[in-house]
Amino acid sequence: MSLTNDIKYKLSNLNVLEKIIAINLIVYILALFLNLSWFELPSGFGDFFAKPWAIITYAFVHYDFLHILFNMLWLFVIGRMFLNLFSVKMALNIYVLGAMSGGLLFMFCYTLFPNTFGGNSNLVGASAAVRALLIFLCAYMPSQDVKLFMFNIKLWHVGLVIVILDILGVFSGISNPVSGNAGGNLAHLGGAMLGYFYAKQLLVGNDIGKGVESLIALFSNMFKRSKKGPLKTVHKNKSKIGGYTKSDFNEFNNQKKIDVILDKISKSGYDSLTTEEKEFLFRAGK
């Protein structure tokens, strides 16, 4: 197998958040050689209307190594936990909406309070999108324990500390604009608000990401090659029943069980699951 085919195979087996990490890394490498300012999000709405795609693309642009390192580490850890419980489509919905919410709050504050936040500035980085995923988990199952070193703490404690640090970061950036990062912390808070609102709406049975899901699907279908091809002879596999193998039926049954558990989570929360259901969901996530 050639190196190109090997890379394609490995990429095809990544989950959606791991693919986002890969895209971020590729864009970071490109940024070492190319000017990507056309993908950065400006602080003024006038400049934004000239490149509206920047409300999404800014979340894939990093220039500093530590910036992308910590963002991608957070995304990897949060992603593993998230995809054990929820679908890849929902992960992508929250990621995209988190980026958009963070970008909008950034532009609103810089436009409404120019004397407070200073002059023109551009926003880059995936922090708002990652914050959205993190705060979603903290708001959806706040009583879930997570291990921090030798201690168990609740997820809502983690979320609260993160939000407080971001608020302090905004004021620190205002008082010291040279070394601070008020714009970045505003975007963090925008992503956090989206994650919180998404979780609270999902708990009452309202998935606010359905519209984004449809838009992403439409965009993806534009780039899919047609499955149609010339007629060809197909060898019948006698081990199949009605065109399906035993493993196909097992996979179908497992998926139905996962769907039932996820539906139970959306209606009653993660804590309503039995020990067996939690273990099954954890194994399925692996």
Image (cartoon, rainbow, N blue to C red):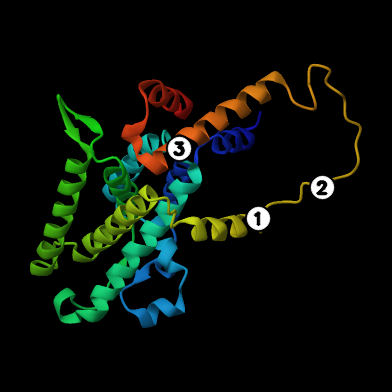
Write the residue at 35% across / 43% down: 75
Q: Position of residue 194 (x, y in %)?
A: 33, 58
**Mark toward the start of the polypeptide (2 vs 1):** 1
Of residue 52 and residue 160, the one placed in the foreground of this image is: 160
Q: Which element is circle 3 on? A: helix
Give the quarter of the figure containing the C terminus.
Answer: top left
Write the residue at 50% across / 56% down: 210
Report if the CB atoms under discs 2 and 3 are less than 8 Å apart.
no
Q: CA distance from mark 2 to mark 3?
A: 34 Å
Q: Identify the residue under disc 2.
A: 228
**Mark toward the start of the polypeptide (1 vs 3):** 1
Amino acid at circle 2: Lys
Q: Identify the residue under disc 3.
A: 262
Q: Position of residue 16 (x, y in %)?
A: 49, 43
**Mark toward the start of the polypeptide (2 vs 3):** 2
| Residue farthest along the top direction in this orientation | 239
> How many numbered marks does the figure carry?
3
Q: Position of residue 95 (x, y in %)?
A: 40, 52
Q: Which element is circle 1 on? A: helix
Amino acid at circle 1: Asn
| Labels 1, 3: front one | 3
Q: Identify the residue under disc 1.
A: 221
Q: Left or right? Give the position of 122 relative to 156.
A: right
Q: Using a 10 Å C-alpha cutoff, classify the residue at mark 2 as few (fewer than 14 neighbours), some (14 to 19) or many (20 or more).
A: few
